[in-house]
Amino acid sequence: MQLYRLFFGPDHPKNKEMPSESWRRSRVDRKNPKSPFSKFIGNDKALKKMLAVAYSALGKPDHLCRDISFALFGPASCGKTGLAKLFAETVGLPFIDVSPKAVKTLDDVFKLIEGVLKSEGLPLVELVKRKHFVLPPLVILFDEVHALNDYIIQGLLKATEFNDATLLTESGRTVDCRNVCWFIATTDEGMLFDAFRTRFSAVNLKYLTKPEISQIVRMANRDWSVEACDLVAHFNSRIPRKALEF
């Protein structure tokens, strides 16, 4: 129940041992304004499997969702990182975004994970075996995975292999990753190692349509008319971020 207290908002049924099926369904219903996924517009087909995994995770006390890892493919600024964050928010787990610019070694990856968990009130505990750690249930995204150096890629492949699930760092740390739901994202699918394709379920995202861009602008500017939002979408018809900055 600790995860419920730490990561869910006031609408979570904390007084119950487990949330009801109807609450779980509403949590992943994109038409429900209280669902984090309601903030993600478009790409309906791509999200179906992700919504099913989130629904299943919400039925477990620890929200574990490691059975499927996701590879987010799509052009720049189509919402890959935002989608991974919304998934983590929906299942109520810590989210860690690993950028190639922020990590040069596997020890850097470990320190980044450790820092985020500590800030969330979940400090890592070193087990009896020196330098051995077990990660709690969480969601980790490796953004622009094709830009990682080869050494980190090899370590990531070992950590994401279902029956291995171990991250070994340069300083000798052993990190048990069996509770992790992994995401990778890339704008260049062709540069990925083939081994990634057997470990991750593909989610192919596309640029949004003008009406979808208009809907995003309207969500951020409730006092604007539909016509004004359509006009913004007309001049910024591919990238939501640019439309919101208009």
Image (cartoon, helix red, strand yellow):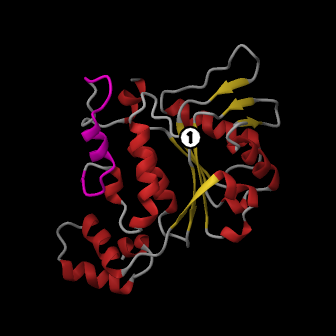
Q: Using a 10 Å C-alpha cutoff, classify the residue at mark 1 as few (fewer than 14 neighbours), some (14 to 19) or many (20 or more).
A: many
Q: Is residue 209 magenta?
A: no
Q: Is residue 144 visible?
A: yes
| Residue at image coords 58%, 38% | 180
Residue lying farthest to the top in this orientation: 128
Q: Nearer the viewer, residue 218 or 27?
A: 27
Tell me which segment is drawn in magenta. Answer: 15-33
Query: Main structural element of the magenta stretch: helix, strand or loop?
Result: loop
Q: Which quarter shows the N terminus?
A: top left
Q: Mark 1 sits on what residue?
A: 66
Residue 125 image offset from top left, x and y in percent: 62, 20
Residue 138, compared with residue 183, is above or below; it is above
Left/right of residue 195 with respect to residue 16 in the rendered view? right
Residue under the point 35% across and 54% down: 37
Three-letter amino acid code at the position of disc 1 = Arg
Q: Nearer the viewer, residue 104 or 127?
A: 127
Quarter of the image for the C terminus: give it.
bottom left
Does the magenta segment cover residue 27? yes
* Residue 163 position within the rendered picture, expressed as x and y whole percent measured from the top left: 70, 37
Residue 18's x, y, as percent?
Answer: 32, 27
Q: Looking at the image, is 80 positioned above or below residue 233?
A: above
Q: Is residue 160 left or right of residue 80?
A: right
Residue 92 in sight from this viewpoint:
no
Residue occupying image coordinates x 42% and y 70% = 241
Find numbered disc 1 in the image and state the secondary structure of the residue it sits on: loop
3 versus 128 height, above or below:
below
Q: How many marks?
A: 1
Report x, y in % for residue 79: 47, 64
Residue 37 versus residue 111: which sits nearer the camera?
37
Q: Is residue 19 left or right of residue 178?
A: left
